[in-house]
Image: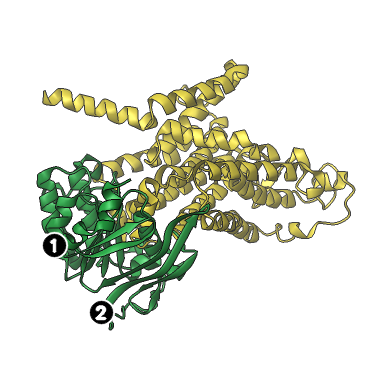
Chain colours: A yellow, B green
Amino acid sequence: MIRKFIHLHSLREWLFIFTILAIATVLLPLFNILVPEESVLHVPNYMFALMGKYLCYALVALAIDLIWGYTGILSLGHGVFFSAGGYAMGMYLMRSVGKEGVYKSDLPDFMVFLDWKELPWYWYGFDSFIFTLLVILILPALFAFTFGYFAFKSRIKGVYFAIITQAMTFALMLLFFRNETGFGGNNGLTDFKRILGYSLQEPSTKMSLYIITAIILFLSYILSRYVVQSKLGRVLTAIRDAESRVMFSGYNTVHYKLFIWTLSAFLCGIAGALYVPQVGIINPSEMQPSNSIEMAIWVAVGGRGTLSGALVGAGLVNGAKSWFTVAAPDYWLYFLGTLFIVVTLYFPKGFTGIFARFNSKEKSKEST
Amino acid sequence: MTGVHIKDDSIDTTHGCILYLEEVTVSFDGFKALNDLNLYIDDGELRCIIGPNGAGKTTMMDVITGKTRPDYGTVFFGQNHDLTKMTEYEISHAGIGRKFQKPTVFLNHTVFENLELALHTQKDVWQSLTQSLTGEQRDIIDEDMETIGLKEQKYLRAGLLSHGQKQWLEIGMLLVQDPRLLLIDEPVAGMTHQETEHTAELLKSLAGKHSIVVVEHEMDFIRSIANRVTVLHEGHVLADGKMEDVQNDPKVIEVYLGS
């Protein structure tokens, strides 16, 4: 088993991965703690919340690559799984506020505002971190499993599947917008104070959350890599390329699609749960249809079916977004749309494809 | 999710027949693609099926492999497998392999990986995730590549193979599934003369070990492989027998040359 994991990458690739991991989780925090603030080399505190957010997006992109890049099933509804994980974490954080809210009540502020007298039953248990953790790990996956079971069993494919997932995220967004649903309406859940007793305002808490996110992203990457390198991964790409041949070869493709779909939602839910304490808010706008489309664009830009491409894509697009929203906020969506069209038309393999093409050109130059 | 249970692996062919189609009718929007079709394939036989376009040849394949359900009639594999009640993958597990009209192989996988995916083994999710090939299984694949003449192309992406090579790879994929019955739809369409000859030899060498049903248009090819030919027309059997007899049958001549 361990040997199998070692064989996932060549020695050089492993060195590269561990170097990145060491820089992210050890070197950057050290440059924050040890280097004095006046120095150019000092890594400011706000960087960790920002990078932590990007890493969550990268985890989402990884999850979408598994289902879209490898299996050819385009989901435009991953915002739902992300939000499911996010809301579960948000509920725990709301409950840990205790009586320190604006209204000094045991209930979350928005419930007091709505004049609710007691906690709805579905908020029970979120006082416990262990319970919340279980919900984060199980709920998005279970929801995806149920949804996927009916969709795949009915042989819904391609564009139809993508449209249904868009409808799903839109419907749930509307549901969560309502105050009566009991998740804070359009304001969502916010004004968190602490996680596991540590203040969320403290730089050290933010840094710890960032480091945890980096490690979870690393582990998720290894897991995904293991999946796509196994025979199961080859069956998935075969389903993408010629599903009927896979069925006639004796595979129950519904089970395979369901497995990877559920795994993808599972990872996406974890990403949402890590996102919320670092960003400090979760609201229904995370389930906007355009949000889920943007997630798919990250993967398209980075390069489908490569895993590493998804990570790069999430970083590139969100980096551009951060810059645009400061420099030219009105033009961001135009830029995103143009980017998507250009990538689809001219660089179907995304950023990693351009890189690979460049590499092979270099090689062919050498050989001639 | 684990354990696609294969109920009964044995195929009861005590009456000498491996495939029974009786009174099979399939209609699409009123058009009868198959109309009271009766067909019996003997165990170990190599049977050719011919017929003009729209005679129902591909629909017949779809019915046998579970892709299309008949409106009426019975389809049995051996005496104990009711194919109308089984899904595609169950039928494949029971021992029926199908080659499509258009060569359908996994273009982004190597020749070796294509055969690995087709290989007869446990095919549920958990097994695929955790198990790797045994030495014995590698030998089976190597042997198969020898049979279909693609040993040199072992690590070549299937998308880079020639048309004829793709056809052979697909036949090779059927073979490693270890099926009792092979359904082969137009194996020599688009092949050069030489490739056609090679394919004829390949199929002849397989008969006996497997029962084979070949659908084809190419008459020279059929003459070179078939003992027995069945002619389909408008969804039912028009004639059946030796190639020479069938060719001289006035009904067949009318269908092919008349109108």
Count up the numbered dots.
Answer: 2
Q: Please give the chain letter of the residue carrying mark 2.
A: B
Give the residue type that dot 1 points to: Lys
Residue A11 left/right relative to B84: left
Q: Give x and y (percent) for residue B13.
A: 28, 80
Residue A251 left/right relative to A122: left
Vertical position of residue A255 compared to residue A332: above or below: below
Q: Give x and y (percent) for residue B27.
A: 48, 57
Badge 2 crowding class, 10 Å Cα cut-off, few under 14, some 14 to 19, many 20 or more, is some
Residue A164 left/right relative to B119: right
Say which element carries label 2: loop
Q: Please give the chain letter of the residue carrying mark 1.
A: B
Question: Going 28% across and 44% down the picture, which residue do you hit?
Answer: B107
Question: Going 75% across and 56% down the picture, which residue do you hit?
Answer: A123
Q: Nearer the viewer, residue A229 or A199?
A: A229
Question: Going 28% across and 63% down the picture, which residue do you hit?
Answer: B239
Say which element carries label 1: helix
User: Is residue B234 at least partly visible in the picture?
Assistant: yes
Residue B52 left/right relative to A49: left
Residue B16, label in figure: 2
Q: Mark 2 and mark 1: span between their CA atoms?
A: 20 Å
Vertical position of residue A298 compared to residue B93: above or below: above
Dot 1 corresponds to which residue? B204
Q: Quadrant of the N terminus of chain A?
A: bottom left
The disc, 2 or 1, on the residue closer to the chain's N-terminal end is 2
User: Is residue B146 at least partly visible in the picture?
Assistant: no
